[in-house]
Amino acid sequence: MASKSVLVDIKRDLEAYVGERIRLKANKGRKKVVEREGVLEGTYPNIFTVRISEADGVRRVSYSYADLLTEAVELVVCSACGKDTKF
């Protein structure tokens, strides 16, 4: 089991990218993978939120830092300079 400090480090790293455009790839199980693009909206003690604009409105999804640690969710920050940062 991962120590709590690893999750705190992930949270601290994500805080620097709040407001940035990201690509999100989430494993929903049973061979279901969802890929979306959105904006990292906020980081909280146990979760982070992503705002996704869709044809029928704005949607917010949340994931835990443990999802990133276990690779159930892959997150790539799309920067303006062309260098992507992967979590």
Image: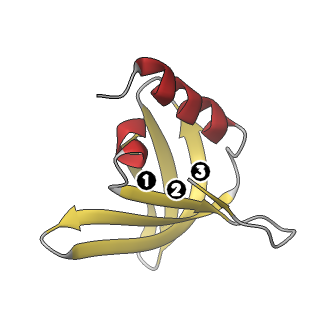
Q: Is residue 1 left or right of residue 78?
A: left
> Residue at left 49%, top 28%?
6
Residue contact between numbered discs 1 and 2, judged by CB atoms under 8 Å: yes
Which residue in the structure is indicated by mark 1?
Answer: 60
Q: Residue at (39%, 52%) from the top-left corner?
A: 61
Q: Residue at x 12, y 71 (%)?
A: 30
User: Residue under circle 2?
Assistant: 51
How crowded is the residue under tag 3: few (<14 C-alpha within 10 Å), some, or many (20+)?
A: many
Choose the circle earlier in sequence order: 3 or 1: 3
Spatial CA distance of label 1 from label 2 is 5 Å
Q: Residues within 10 Å of mark 1 (few under 14, many from 20)?
A: few
Q: Marks 3 and 1, how far apart in space?
A: 10 Å
Name the amino acid, label 2: Arg
- 36 and 25: which is toward the camera: 25
Quickly name the residue at label 3: 40
> In this view, which residue lies farthest toward the left?
30
Q: Residue furthest bottom?
A: 55
Q: x%, y% of residue 1?
A: 28, 28
User: Horizontal and vertical percent for residue 41?
Assistant: 58, 46
Residue 67's place in the image compared with 10, above or below, is below
